Image (cartoon, rainbow, N blue to C red):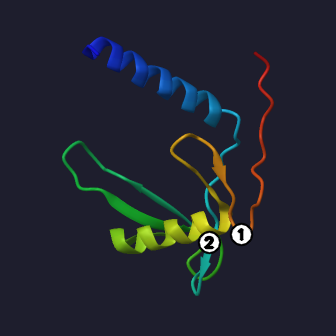
Amino acid sequence: MNSFAGFALLDAFILYRDLKESQYEWAPYILQDLDGIFTIGYGKNGWFSSMKYWKTYQSGPNEGQKVYIEKDEFNFWKKEAEALWGRLDFWGNFVPGLLNPELPTAKLEI
């Protein structure tokens, strides 16, 4: 198989997964600790900066604050959120969570 065919297969798979994922409505994971209810996030501040992880509190004593956390803590909360609320697998299929056995979908008219 030449490299063009390999890229064509990869593009077809990515298109398939993007179409499958486009039927879902997205929302942040909602979690809670002793300081309140929060969402998690990550990103970089620039091209050469390291990845940063944080919790943004929606309620409680830290409401409105962005609290930076370590990668290990972020990974813990991400796994906790996926177990509670569900996740998408490699193929774009929804894997149910304990609190969310079914993901709302949007009907696509093609």
In the rendered image, is residue 75 in sight?
yes
Which SS class for mark 1? Answer: loop
Q: CA distance from mark 1 to mark 2?
A: 13 Å
Which SS class for mark 2? Answer: strand
Q: Where is mark 2, residue-wise?
A: 31
Picture quarter with the N terminus: top left
Of residues 22 and 44, the one nearer the viewer is 22
Q: Where is mark 1, residue-wise?
A: 98
Horizontal placement of 46 versus 41: left or right?
A: left
In the displayed structure, 105 sits above or below 59; it is: above
Of residues 33 and 35, the one nearer the viewer is 33
The image quarter containing residue 51 is bottom left
Residue extending farthest to the bottom is 34
Mark 1 / mark 2, whichever is N-terminal: 2
The tag on residue 74 is none
Residue drawn at x 56%, y 30% is 18
In the displayed structure, 78 sits above or below 26; it is: below
Q: Position of residue 73 (x, y in %)?
A: 41, 75
Q: How many marks?
A: 2
